Amino acid sequence: MAGPAWRFLQPSNDCLVTLPDALAAGAMRQLASGSARGIPLPAGESGAAGLAGPGLMCKDGARRKVAHLDARSRVLLIHTEGATSPAVYQQLVGETADSVLQRQQQWRQASIG
């Protein structure tokens, strides 16, 4: 996290995690896939890292304990980045952001209908 926002965010953090690029790419694919309960979402690497981080922390008992994550925990993810680089997005996800947006529209129509 760079820039002026850090001075406001830093005091409210209990813990931080860094993660490999491959985990962010996996989260991008997961978000793009959607599910019966989750709308397909075209997320860039930084946006998807918010999903990958808690997943990584939950797999490690020490990290999970430091983050106070347990079965009662609720995690709020703030997605801040879409597919800002179309070529990179397609390479990492295996489809275009436009394709994900089309499935997003279909998902919305199916959940309304």
Image (cartoon, helix red, strand yellow):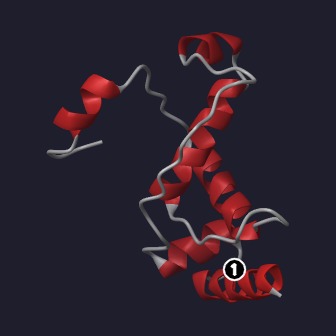
How many numbered badges does the structure rendering display?
1
**Whether residue 55 is visible:** yes
Mark 1, residue position: 95
The quarter of the picture where residue 54 lies is top right
Rendered-image quadrant of the C terminus: bottom right
Which percent across, then down, holds residue 61? Answer: 70, 13
Rendered-image quadrant of the N terminus: top left
Which percent across, then down, holds residue 40? Answer: 69, 71
Residue, far front: 113
Question: Would you call the spot at circle 1 few (<14 residues within 10 Å), some (14-19), or many (20 or more)?
Answer: some
**Whether residue 21 is visible:** no
Q: Looking at the image, which is closer to me, 110 or 104?
A: 110
Helix, strand or loop at mark 1: loop
Which percent across, then down, holds residue 24? Answer: 58, 50
Q: Looking at the image, which is closer to me, 26 or 110?
A: 110
The quarter of the picture where residue 60 lies is top right
Picture residue at 63% right of the left edge, 10% below the top: 62
Q: From the viewer's perspective, is residue 53 above or below residue 26?
A: above
Q: From the viewer's perspective, is residue 97 above or below residue 80?
A: below
Q: Looking at the image, which is closer to me, 108 or 26?
A: 108
Name the kind of residue labelled 1 in the image: Glu
Picture residue at 55% right of the left edge, 66% below the top: 43
Q: From the viewer's perspective, is residue 75 above or below residue 14?
A: below
Q: Looking at the image, which is closer to me, 44 or 11?
A: 11
Picture residue at 76% right of the left edge, 88% below the top: 109
Picture residue at 63% right of the left edge, 66% below the top: 92
Q: From the viewer's perspective, is residue 15 above or below residue 65?
A: below
